[in-house]
Image (spheres, helix red, strand yellow):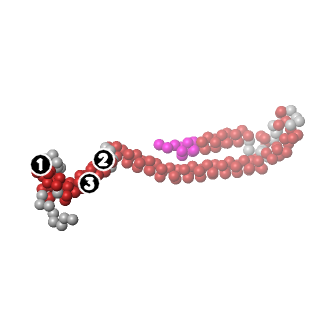
Amino acid sequence: MILSPCSREKELIELLARGAWPDACPPELRTHVAGCRACGDLVLVTRTLRRARAEAAGAANPGSPGALWWRAQLRRRNAAVERVGRPILGALIFAFSVNLLLAGGFLVFQARHGLNWFSWLKQIPQALTLPLGALWPAGVFDSGWSLMALIPALAALALLSGVVVYVASDKQ
């Protein structure tokens, strides 16, 4: 165990700090390091730490700043699209459920009051034995809602629902 530092240790530290070891050092200093245990350990530890530092710096190289900036902008845009998309998805689901509810309510109302579809269902077994013309009820155009108004209204509802779904799901 050496309690006092070596007399040539300062000179060796200076050479190691400049990166001049072992190429730019005098031959007698190399001979001294080979014989002195404290100086040999200093060279060994310094070289090992520098090698580890160089490896860590090489592994942590993130790449060019332009690519880093581009990736950060892409992540920011994707996060913004995701944040905006969440309420749109909720509105889309709400609009779809409202359309289904309205269409179901409209069909039930028409079945009970407008076209009397339930009475048609009772007549189907009798109509199967008759010619094809008997399947068309004669009172369709006498009811409160005309079939000529019902079909375009349902088509307009379906078209409008399709447009709403397309606009709400369009991701630009």
- Disc 1 marks a residue whose amino acid type is Pro
Residue appearing at x 40%, y 49% in the figure: 76
The residues bearing labels 3 and 2 have C-alpha atoms spaced at a distance of 14 Å
What residue sits right under mark 3 in the picture?
49
**Percent from the top left, x then y, of residue 142?**
79, 42
Q: Is residue 97 left or right of residue 4?
A: right
**Percent from the top left, x then y, of residue 4?**
15, 66
User: Which badge, 2 or 1, comes first in the chain's sequence?
Assistant: 1
Q: Are marks 2 and 1 in contact (CB under 8 Å)?
A: no
- Disc 3 marks a residue whose amino acid type is Leu
Instruction: Name the foreground residue: 28 vs 59.
Output: 28
Residue appearing at x 50%, y 50% in the figure: 85
The residues bearing labels 1 and 3 have C-alpha atoms spaced at a distance of 24 Å
In this picture, which residue range is highlighted in magenta? 163-172
> On the rendered image, what quadrant is the N terminus found in?
bottom left
* Circle nearer the viewer, 2 or 1: 1
Residue appearing at x 32%, y 44% in the figure: 63
Quadrant location of residue 139? Answer: top right
What residue sits right under mark 2 in the picture?
58
What residue sits right under mark 1 in the picture?
27
**Percent from the top left, x then y, of residue 165?**
57, 44
Which residue is most to the front?
Answer: 35
Q: Is residue 98 left or right of residue 3?
A: right
